[in-house]
Image (spheres, helix red, strand yellow):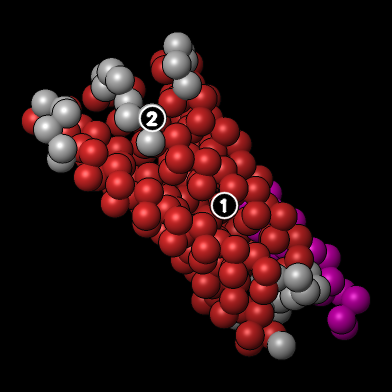
Amino acid sequence: MRFRIRPVETTFYDLFTQSASHLVTGAGLLAEMLAEGADREEVARRMREAEHAADETTHEIVKRVNSTFVTPFDREDIYDLGSGLDDIMDEMDEVVDMILVYEVDGLPPELSDQVTVIQRCAELTAAAMPNLRSMRSLQEYWIEINRLENQGDKNHRRILAKLFSGEYKAMEVLKLKDIVESLEGAIDAFEKVANTVEQIAVKES
């Protein structure tokens, strides 16, 4: 019986790994969007494609949960992890879209610090997902994500302080604040995923 359900379990792990790989792609596109001279229309188009691919993976996870009798761990945790990974992609897509439609010139260079945090979180998350099979080497992942989230909070406060320093016009502040908050939202979403992984690992230990 165990042999028969093993392919189902492998599929779930593969889907989580695939979902996390979309985040690496999205974080890379986010970095491109902030680069000087970027073709914003083109980057936004590619981000929409990446976000659509991420949605497809999430839908496949939900479909398999609903059609699988025996799941590798709690169904609720599978839903939480799948939707959590999808939420991160949505936040990054939102940032790219806002930069495009708000037509913001002269993005604060400090935003790159947040994107660097996001890229590192994406890399760590992508590396951690395959370890769900064995539930090993995961503690280092959620500890490091927590540290990065704290760094993101510090960056967030410094960026807001600069926005409200009088250096920017009121309308620019409103536009930039939306972008800054979504970057922070993406980092917070990474921590939520890490907390879900920790919860799963504790239950399975």
Residue 48's x, y, as percent? 47, 30
Residue closer to the observer: 76 or 31: 31
Q: Which residue is found at the position 68% from the left and 69% from the top?
A: 140
The answer to whether residue 9 is magenta is: yes
Q: How far apart are marks 2 and 1 (CA)?
A: 20 Å
**In this picture, is 104 found above or below 20?**
above
Whether residue 4 is visible here, answered yes or no, is: yes
Residue picked out by circle 1: 121
When the figure is inspected, residue 113 is found, relative to residue 5, above or below; the finding is above
Residue at x 45%, y 35% (from the top left corner): 112
Q: In which quarter of the image is residue 134?
A: bottom right
Tell me which amino acid carries mark 2.
Pro
Report the magenta residues as a range. 1-20
Q: In this view, does 4 lie above or below 40?
A: below
Residue 71 seen by the camera: no
- Which residue is at 45% across, 56% downward? 151
Badge 1 marks a residue whose secondary structure is: helix
Front of the two marks 2 and 1: 2
Answer yes or no: do the residues labelled 2 and 1 have beta carbons within 8 Å?
Answer: no
Is residue 128 toward the left or the right of residue 40 in the image?
Answer: right
Residue 10 appears in which quarter of the rendering? bottom right
Q: Name the residue under label 2.
A: 109
- Amino acid of disc 1: Cys
Residue 120: x and y in percent read 59, 48
Residue at point 45%, 25% (across, down)? 33
Q: In which quarter of the image is residue 171?
A: top left
Magenta segment, principal secondary structure?
helix
Q: Which mark is residue 65?
A: none
